[in-house]
Image (cartoon, rainbow, N blue to C red):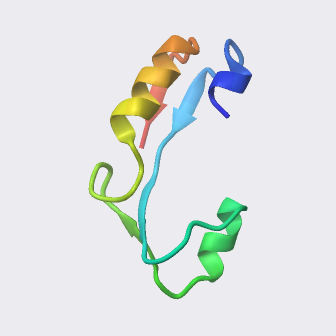
């Protein structure tokens, strides 16, 4: 998604989560799952290093959490 919007995603807001089981097709479906929990950045399932590197390559000015 970040690569798709190269040059247009000037600010990226990151959140991390823990989800037991499968990852749903639509991220908003996470909120309906009982086993979903937000986690501190880097303590969940997101590949934070890859997201930050991809954001830099896409021309993002700010990455916030």
Task: Pick the quarter of the image with the N terminus.
Answer: top right
* Residue 64 percent coordinates (x, y): 44, 36
In the displayed structure, does residue 63 sit left or right of residue 60? left
Residue drawn at (54%, 72%), measured in percent from left and top?
22
Residue 18 figure quarter: bottom left
* Residue 59 percent coordinates (x, y): 56, 11
26 or 41, which lies in front?
26
Residue projecting furthest to the front: 22
Above or below: residue 64 compared with residue 7 = below
Residue 19 figure quarter: bottom left
Residue projecting furthest to the bottom: 34
Numbered label tally: 0
* Residue 35 percent coordinates (x, y): 47, 84
Task: Pick the quarter of the image with the C terminus.
Answer: top left
10 or 30, which lies in front?
30
Residue drawn at (57%, 27%), measured in percent from left and top?
11
Above or below: residue 12 compared with residue 26 = above
In the displayed structure, does residue 47 sit left or right of residue 36? left
In the displayed structure, does residue 44 sit left or right of residue 64? left
Residue projecting furthest to the left: 43
Residue drawn at (47%, 44%), measured in percent from left and top?
14
Residue drawn at (41%, 28%), measured in percent from left and top?
52
Residue 33 figure quarter: bottom right
């Amino acid at each position: 998604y970040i690569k798709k919007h190269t040059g247009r995603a000037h600010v990226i807001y990151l959140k991390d989560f823990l989800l037991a089981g499968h990852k749903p097709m639509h991220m908003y479906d996470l909120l309906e799952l009982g086993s979903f929990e937000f986690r501190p950045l880097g303590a969940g399932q997101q590949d934070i290093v890859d997201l930050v590197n991809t954001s830099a390559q896409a021309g993002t000015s700010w990455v916030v959490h």
